[in-house]
Amino acid sequence: MIELLSSGTRATVQEWPGRLGYWEVGVPPSGPMDARSFRLGNRLVGNAQGAAGIEVTLTAPRMRFEQRTVITVTGAPIAVEIDGEPRRQWVALDVEAGSVLKLGSIRGVGLRSYVLVRGGIDRPAVMGSRATFAPAGLGGGALRKGDRLAIGDAMAALPIGTWINAPPMTNEWTLRVVPGPHGAPDFLTADGLEELWRAAWAVHLHSDRTGVRLTGPVPGWARADGGEAGLHPSNILDSAYGVGTVMLAGDMAVIVGPDGPSLGGFAAIAQVIRADLWRLGQVRAGDAVSLDPVDPEHATALHDASEEEIAVLPQAPPQRRPPKRQTPPAPILDAPRDGSGGPLTFRRAGECSLLVEFGEPLLELRSRVRVHLLRAALDDAAPAGLLDLTPGVRSLHVQHDPGRLPAAELLKLLVALEAQLPAPDAATVPGRVVHLPLAWRDPVAMSAIARYESVRAHAPWCPDNIEFIRRINGLPDEQAVKSIMFSASYLVLGLGDVYMGAPVAVPLDPRHRLVTTKYNPARTWTPPNAVGIGGAFLCVYGMEGPGGYQLVGRTVPIWHAGDDPPWRLRHFDELRFEPVAAEELTELRSASEAGTWAPRVEPGGFSLAAHERYLADNAAEIAAFRARREAAFRAEREAWACDSAETV
């Protein structure tokens, strides 16, 4: 048993590789942010590489060991004392019963250190892992003074009993990346993309386990806006990311961390290679970062060499040279083609993922049905090496193990499966109708807008998000906005947009599609279950955290740990909102969390043929609504252009 005598800063229990298999519903893997230091430490003390240990950030807890054991401290440089005696990092250390481990502060270089104990930390697994996703409370939260941690039996071998060289730490980092899935010339100009590779980026103060935020040059965009996805050219129809994805959120680059979101509406220009992901755990505010594009074969060779180095300790790995670097290929794997149900594009999304895009970059539900059909075909085929499948609005993100399922073979399989899909017009996708209460202008949600005014008080959406929605959609008053919100049926196209089963949904009737831009920069705080609009989409926030949707109110939890599964919404569910007062919502939220209340659910389903008949029958009114909305959209943009101090 280990007793914490002090808490330190954001110390958590982590386990490698983390909580896998839930990316599709917005549950990140978590796990150690510097997995290399973590795994090497476990090898030093004779554990299985994934045994649970303690990750510390900046300052570490003091801890007392109530039994004799073997430990090591790895990661960033930090002072180590056992019973007042200085000790070394990166070496297996004998600890006697009653001994106290004291760690100093991480200063100068690096950000995270790791305490690994022979046998690992033993605690109940949550959704298959002991890893901590603190923002949602999965696996617990940050460790606190007085916590007691049991020592387990995850030994794999005798302790190595020697020291190993620490990986180099610095304040100037190079992250090697595989370009894609988005790039030039469709999103960025060729010169604009090249400038991002040449730039010296700086790590932003607000970086954390969810993502490393980088400040640098304003991207050279090849388009004026994101169309129906939003007013900023970085906005896209929501698509999946991976851990290590480099997205452009507005004009800021963000690298998705192990606690990051699985789905979002921003263009992704690159993927950090697996061999360099550990570096994301050690960059600190103010550090310089450069992005170095490499080809996938080179990235895979570097990964193989890194894995071999960890596996053969304490012997030195054989010296082998990775293949000569080639010019990174374009993100599009093959020329866009006509598939069985329309246009089809395959994009490279790193060394371990492909992104399949359906149709044109427009919001039409035919593409989402095709995503559903291909996903079902892949589930049935179940090739060895296939990992997570994450649907987006018009895309399917396919993660794979290139050692077992090379990208070329996966591409060949995807092409063959897509060619055999049934016509989307003939499909009826199972779904439900879910009724949720909505407190319009809920004071907790509105407080998030008020907080943001200290960030960008004169942003077009401040001080009132609802007024911004009204203005940019050409509606006469707030009641018109409210009437549309409560009349609409929102079809769930993706889950996990902002974690924990959070839906990205679109009104079935185009006359209910209110279009906005997202916050730029994003809010740093949003209350759980706030309801907002971004682009043409509605989202219910699954948990507290940052966000960019324009907020209108708040609803009940959409994640309940007592349910099986705990996420309450499914793909192709229809959401319908019912107005309640803020006080009543508070009561419903309490009852929901206690398990004594649940949303009303009715049978449903989505027929593309019926939907397209509805569109044809109401084409004139839909066209008139769009024309009015687009005119208001243009007027808003022109107003911003006249104000040199404000942009989207």
Image (cartoon, rainbow, N blue to C red):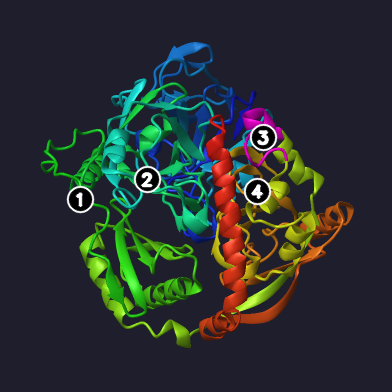
Q: Position of residue 599 (x, y in %)?
A: 76, 68
Question: Do the CB atoms of the residues marked 1 and 2 lie less than 8 Å apart?
Answer: no
> N-terminal of the two: label 4 or label 2?
2
What's the residue at 59%, 22% (across, down)? Answer: 62
Q: Which residue is mark 4?
A: 550
Question: Do the CB atoms of the residues marked 3 and 4 lie less than 8 Å apart?
Answer: no
Taking depth in this image into account, of 278 and 532 the one nearest to the observer is 532
Left or right for 528, reference 24: right
Mark number for residue 329?
1
Q: Is residue 477 above or below residue 358?
A: above
Left or right for 26, reference 377: right
Distance CA(mark 3)–CA(mark 4):
12 Å
What's the residue at 81%, 65% (across, down)? Answer: 597
> N-terminal of the two: label 1 or label 2?
2
Q: Amino acid at mark 2?
A: Ala
Residue 68 colored magenta? no
Q: Secondary structure at mark 3?
A: helix
Q: Secondary structure at mark 4?
A: strand
Q: Amino acid at mark 4?
A: Gln
Taking depth in this image into account, of 318 and 397 the one nearest to the observer is 397
> N-terminal of the two: label 4 or label 1?
1
- Point out the stretch of residues depicted in magenta: 451-463
Q: Which residue is mark 2?
A: 156
Q: Nearer the viewer, mark 1 or mark 2?
A: 1
Distance CA(mark 4)–CA(mark 2):
51 Å
Q: Pointer 1: residues within 10 angstroms few (<14), some, or many (20+)?
A: some
Q: Judge whether residue 499 can be spotted in this image.
A: no
Q: Position of residue 586 (x, y in %)?
A: 84, 52
Mark number for residue 452?
3
Q: Amino acid at mark 1?
A: Pro
